[in-house]
Image (tube, coloured by chain):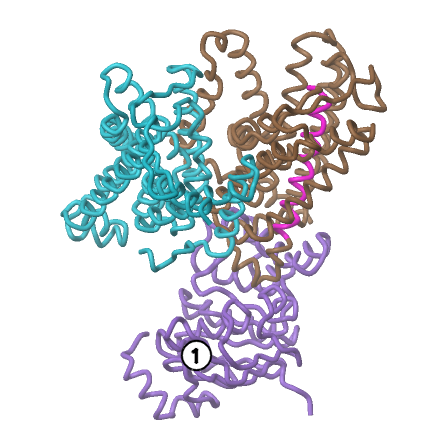
Chain colours: A purple, B brown, C cyan
């Protein structure tokens, strides 16, 4: 029996006395697209940070492609093939978008190849035109997509997208969804997507995970999730935030 | 990058030709050497201070290690500086690694403080180890007469090609680094360490590499300084103000992180210094460091962002180049 | 045993002075968030003020220290309002180099004005030392220590018992919130920087009672001051005072085992180790 691409078991993260994640467990298969939803403060971003090694879990295991990732530094996790985008975008200021993407590619390949990778990644996201822009001159949606391009340049097997569609128009959102599915088909990349926009998540995901107060309260197909009483309760109980 | 290297080579050759044109014993030749040396020193600092924005106030440690290593090896074993200086560079690199490991997680002022203390440790250490270093009284380079093999000459003019070569070497290291893989990574680490890690950059290794290269270059400058002055003592070569802060000043005056920054800075600083020394300093000792302090304050107040943003230049140059590829 | 106790006693007395000298640095960092590399220059300045007070007015350095306190406050306040305020929200690179620039200006300014000569005072206290069983206590260090304790108590009372102190502490904790409560934080920043400079200058006045003044004396105290505040936790006032005592004792006790030239080496190694391992300070929260 082959192991899933990512298997997370019983991961608990504490900040001080506060449990940010409590015994979270799930798996991601090769080329799967998964939605991760939950009210604000549910622990979605913490979950991503922990997966890529920015936080160290108090207990639990994160196996990626058969290797234990807990305790590895983020650059090791990235080189193993798992990386994330930053919610409020963390492109390197003082560089062009192209240089941002190029720098990520340089993490694992020499300059000449990295240039090709960078150009290809920008093209994959239809961002060739924005390559020369300084980060400071980019719009918020451009930065969010730029994050995706930079993450793509690390040649990931699993990409964790943290609200990259937050500021997009519905039409742009459809385009990004199509891009994600295309990348999945052509490069075999798996995605875990955090997004507040329910319609986008429902359209995109094969499976949806629901976090609430650091606990995984539900998981299933989009249809199952939208009719799950616990999920509805979590969203209504926490106040609507969309 | 090729263009930058070409221009650097032209500057170095022009300096050598100028040295040949001047009287080899003249004051002007001496000033030329000092300018080239200051540019090399500022450029070595620029590698960590400019590319990684780690503000070191302890580069005197590496300068002094370089100066003492080659000089002690000459005094004790008659070893030529051609070998002694690279050994000094290696020792400085080791010292840089040793101090970088515990301090590189430190941010901004904390890092500056730790490096400042490290420079002081080296100064006190050199004073205390009088058996090797001659203690506070200092150490003279033994004179063997004009000898290229021992890298020593009576006339300052003969040092111009050496300083020009060293200037070219350190500047070329900076140019290659800043345009190359390491430069991109250092800048990424500077801008956002977390994001750099997540995009697969080993931030610890990158910072360590930068620190080591910068220290080795600084040590070479220190070694040649000893050959040029024939005398070193701990208070001079390990001086926080005259080496560490001056190295930073040279880069800052011309523009932090820019290849041309330390060159412009060295011209300005050395010329002002020499002018003041020859006119005012008998009457007013301390006037030139005083004015450089004023210059620092004015630069900071006039353009607080100017210190870290060579940004428009970077985006212009690197962005365009990127697209051709 | 006796030499060790004597060394600790000596260290304790001089350590109290170190605490006062360094507490200004900690206060400035705690309130403004700025590491002032020029802080030790206020010590130099305080020494000169006290020296001139002794030389021309015949004032004891302890009284001269009070004049130094006033002079330090005024200069510090002006420097903050005119210069430091402009980099309050700038990158740390700008903050570092502004204060490094000030260091060069003050040190070399003093060299140009006062010349390179060493200037020391002669007081009666320097000749006296008290016997306490097998131990000796020098009157001049005892006086210095008493002055240090007095100013520390005054500082404590100012910070904890007055409106101004509460405003300073509120600004240090959360400047935007302090502003909401009607505190003019810019003014508080000026006061805090002035106060920090005043304390260090006062310390300088005390130091003059047992050490000579010269333009570059600040450089000799820079790392010592930073060691003190880093030990106590940068930004912590109590921590700096305790850190001063600790540094005084370490320095004094290390003379028993280390040659005199290496005395400061022990200190610097401790400094880097603490910075690297516990940037929040050895005394950490306990001292807050």
User: Measured from the top left, where is residue B3 in percent x and y?
Assistant: 70, 33
User: Measured from the top left, where is residue A40 in percent x and y?
Assistant: 35, 74
Residue B311 seen in render: no
Q: Secondary structure at mark 1?
A: strand
Residue that appears at 27% across and 19% down: C54
User: Which quarter of the figure is the N terminus of chain B placed in?
Assistant: top right
State the extent of the magenta-drawn residues as a range. Answer: B206-229
Residue C249 located within the stretch drawn in magenta: no
Residue behind mark 1: A21
Q: Nearer the viewer, residue B125 or A4?
A: B125
User: Measured from the top left, where is residue B30 in percent x and y?
Assistant: 67, 14
Give the main secondary structure, helix, strand or loop, of the magenta stretch. Answer: helix
Q: Nearer the viewer, residue A111 or B199?
A: B199
User: Measured from the top left, where is residue B178 in percent x and y?
Assistant: 64, 42
Q: Chain of mark 1?
A: A
- Asked if residue C170 is positioned above or below residue B93 in the image, the reply reads below
Residue A144 seen in render: yes
């Amino acid at each position: 029996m082959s192991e899933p691409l990512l298997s997370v078991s019983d991961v608990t993260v504490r900040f001080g006395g506060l449990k940010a994640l409590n015994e979270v467990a799930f798996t991601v298969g090769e080329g799967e697209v998964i939605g991760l939803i939950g009210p604000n403060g549910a622990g979605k971003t913490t979950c991503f940070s922990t997966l890529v090694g920015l936080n160290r879990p108090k207990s639990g295991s994160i196996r990626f492609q058969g290797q234990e990732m807990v305790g590895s530094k983020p650059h090791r996790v990235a080189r193993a093939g798992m990386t994330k985008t930053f919610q409020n975008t963390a492109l390197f200021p003082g560089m062009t978008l192209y240089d941002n993407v190029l720098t990520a590619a340089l993490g694992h390949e020499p300059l000449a190849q990295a240039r090709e990778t960078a150009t290809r990644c920008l093209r994959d996201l239809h961002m060739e035109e924005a390559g020369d822009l300084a980060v400071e001159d980019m719009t918020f949606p451009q930065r969010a997509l730029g994050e995706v391009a930079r993450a793509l340049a690390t040649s990931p097997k699993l990409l964790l997208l943290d609200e990259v569609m937050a500021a997009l128009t519905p039409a742009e959102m459809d385009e990004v969804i199509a891009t994600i599915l295309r990348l999945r088909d052509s490069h075999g990349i798996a995605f875990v997507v955090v997004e507040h926009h329910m319609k986008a998540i429902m359209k995109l995901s094969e499976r949806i995970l629901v976090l609430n107060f650091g606990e995984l309260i539900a998981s299933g197909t989009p249809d199952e999730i939208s009719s799950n009483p616990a999920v509805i309760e979590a969203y209504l109980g926490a106040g609507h935030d969309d | 990058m090729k263009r930058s290297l070409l221009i650097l080579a032209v500057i170095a050759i022009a300096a050598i030709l100028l040295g040949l044109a001047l009287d080899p014993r003249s004051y002007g030749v001496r000033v030329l050497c000092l300018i080239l040396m200051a540019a090399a020193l500022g450029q070595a600092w620029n590698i960590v201070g400019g590319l990684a924005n780690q503000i070191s106030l302890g580069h005197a440690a590496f300068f002094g290690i370089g100066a003492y290593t080659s000089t002690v090896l000459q005094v004790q074993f008659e070893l030529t500086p051609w070998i002694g200086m690279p050994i000094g560079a290696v020792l400085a690199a080791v010292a840089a690694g040793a101090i970088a490991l515990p301090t590189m997680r430190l941010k901004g002022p904390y890092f500056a403080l730790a490096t400042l203390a490290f420079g002081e440790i080296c100064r006190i250490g050199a004073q205390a180890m009088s058996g090797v270093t001659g203690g506070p009284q200092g150490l003279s380079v033994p004179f063997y007469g004009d000898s290229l093999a021992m890298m020593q000459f009576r006339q300052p003019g003969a040092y111009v090609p050496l300083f020009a070569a060293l200037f070219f070497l350190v500047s070329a290291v900076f140019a290659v680094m800043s345009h190359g893989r390491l430069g991109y990574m250092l800048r990424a680490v500077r801008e956002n360490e977390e994001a750099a890690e997540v995009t697969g950059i080993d931030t610890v290794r990158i910072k360590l590499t930068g620190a080591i290269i910068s220290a080795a270059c600084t040590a070479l400058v220190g070694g040649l300084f000893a050959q040029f002055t024939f005398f070193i003592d701990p208070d001079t070569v390990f001086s926080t103000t005259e080496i560490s802060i001056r190295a930073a000043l040279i880069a800052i005056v011309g523009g932090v992180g820019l290849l041309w920054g330390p060159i412009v800075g060295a011209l300005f600083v050395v010329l002002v210094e020499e002018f003041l020394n020859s006119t005012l300093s008998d009457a007013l000792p301390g006037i030139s460091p005083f004015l450089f302090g004023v210059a620092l304050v004015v630069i900071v107040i006039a353009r607080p962002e100017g210190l870290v943003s060579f940004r428009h230049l970077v985006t212009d140059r690197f962005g365009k180049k990127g697209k051709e590829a | 045993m006796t030499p060790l106790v004597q060394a600790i006693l000596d260290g304790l007395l001089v350590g109290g002075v170190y605490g006062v000298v360094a507490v200004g640095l900690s206060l400035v960092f705690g309130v403004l968030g700025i590491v002032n590399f020029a802080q030790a220059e206020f010590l130099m300045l305080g020494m000169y003020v006290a020296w001139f007070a002794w030389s021309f007015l015949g004032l004891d350095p302890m009284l001269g220290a009070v004049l130094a306190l006033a002079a330090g406050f005024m200069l510090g306040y002006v420097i903050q309002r005119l210069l430091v305020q402009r980099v309050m929200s700038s990158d740390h690179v700008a903050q570092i180099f502004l204060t490094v620039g000030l260091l060069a200006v003050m040190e070399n300014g003093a060299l140009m004005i006062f010349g390179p000569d060493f200037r020391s005072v002669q007081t009666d206290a320097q000749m006296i030392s008290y016997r306490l069983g097998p131990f000796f206590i020098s009157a001049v260090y005892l006086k210095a220590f008493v002055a240090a304790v007095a100013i520390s108590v005054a500082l404590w009372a100012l910070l904890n018992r007055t409106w101004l102190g509460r405003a300073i502490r509120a600004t240090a904790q959360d400047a935007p919130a302090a502003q909401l409560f009607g505190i003019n934080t810019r003014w508080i920043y000026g006061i805090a920087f002035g106060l920090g400079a005043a304390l260090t200058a006062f310390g300088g006045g005390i130091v003059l009672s047992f050490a000579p003044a010269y333009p570059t004396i600040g450089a000799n105290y820079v790392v010592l001051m930073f060691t003190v505040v880093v030990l106590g936790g940068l930004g912590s006032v109590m921590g700096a005072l305790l850190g001063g005592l600790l540094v005084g004792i370490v320095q004094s006790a290390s003379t028993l085992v280390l040659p005199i030239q290496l005395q400061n080496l022990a200190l610097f190694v401790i400094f880097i180790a603490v910075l690297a391992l516990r940037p929040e300070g050895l005394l950490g929260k306990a001292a807050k």
